[in-house]
Image: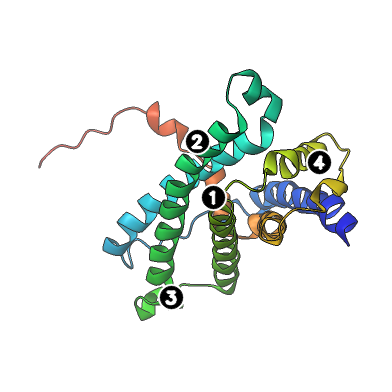
Amino acid sequence: MNTFIYGVLPYIALTIMVGGTIIRYAYGERGWTTKSSEFLSKQDLKWGSYLFHGGLFMAVGGHFVGILVPKFVTEAAGTGEHAYHMIALAGGIPAAILFLGGFLMLLKRRFAGSARMAANTSSIDKWLYLVLLLTIVSGTAATIQNIPGAFDYRETISPWFRSLLMLQPDVSLMDGVPKVFQFHMFLWMVLAITFPFTRLVHCLSLPFEYFFRRDIIYRKK
């Protein structure tokens, strides 16, 4: 089972994510949207959205460094294991608070708000919120559980992920990983599989043209 989950499923998930996203953009560009509900409820969106996206950017940055930067690189730069762990907690805990807090606010808005909001929530939206909730909660739980620093993910999860990128998956690295971390790893694969079919695709459409477009001039009548 471990061979499939950590040696095969990641490639299935990434293939569906990349291939499904390309197909959706090519054949369903009109549905490439977040399906904004701001016109239904604006006031309770503001802070939830800011906190969620702020925590998201912090979490992505932390994951990028923790997973893709080998341990020997940070040690060669003079950052020992204890110092790295303290830095990771200093960024990880605030990120988890913002990320989870913002998501709970958006969750409350979506499912405990107006009847119009519920009517504009599709089945795929419900599955997406569930997967996101489990992913964020498991990541937060893993961060809290590892506050003492007993588990060094840079000697297990990080080299496993890099082995996937090198197309030489070493599933044995995941054998002794705590269950909460294993569950978190499984959930990112589920999230990757669902990505092309949800509103998450909007993160690939950055409005770069906004910074270069000509000014729009409004005149009073």
Distance in Å between CA atoms under marks 3 and 2: 36 Å
Picture coordinates of residue 183, whole percent (x, y): 69, 61
Q: Residue 210: x, y in percent?
A: 39, 33
Q: Please give the label number shown on residue 111.
A: 3
Q: Give the residue type that dot 2 points to.
A: Ile
In the image, residue 114 lies at what x, y percent? 34, 77
The residue lying toward the viewer, choosing from 92 and 109, is 92
Measure how far apart labels 1 and 4 are at the Cα level. Answer: 27 Å
Residue 89, which numbered label? Answer: none
> Does residue 64 appear to the left or right of 45 in the view shown?
right
Q: Secondary structure at mark 2?
A: helix
Amino acid type, callout 4:
Leu
Q: Name the amino acid, label 3.
A: Phe
What separation in Å lies between label 4 and label 2 (alpha carbons)? 26 Å
Mark nearest the camera among 3 and 2 is 2
Secondary structure, mark 1, is loop
Q: Mark 1 to mark 2: distance in Å? A: 11 Å
**Of callouts 1 and 4, which one flags the residue occurring earlier in the amino acid sequence?**
1
Residue 87 circle label: 2
Mark 2 closeness class: few <14, some 14–19, many ≥20 residues within 10 Å: few
Residue bearing mark 1: 147
Of labels 1 and 3, earlier in sequence is 3
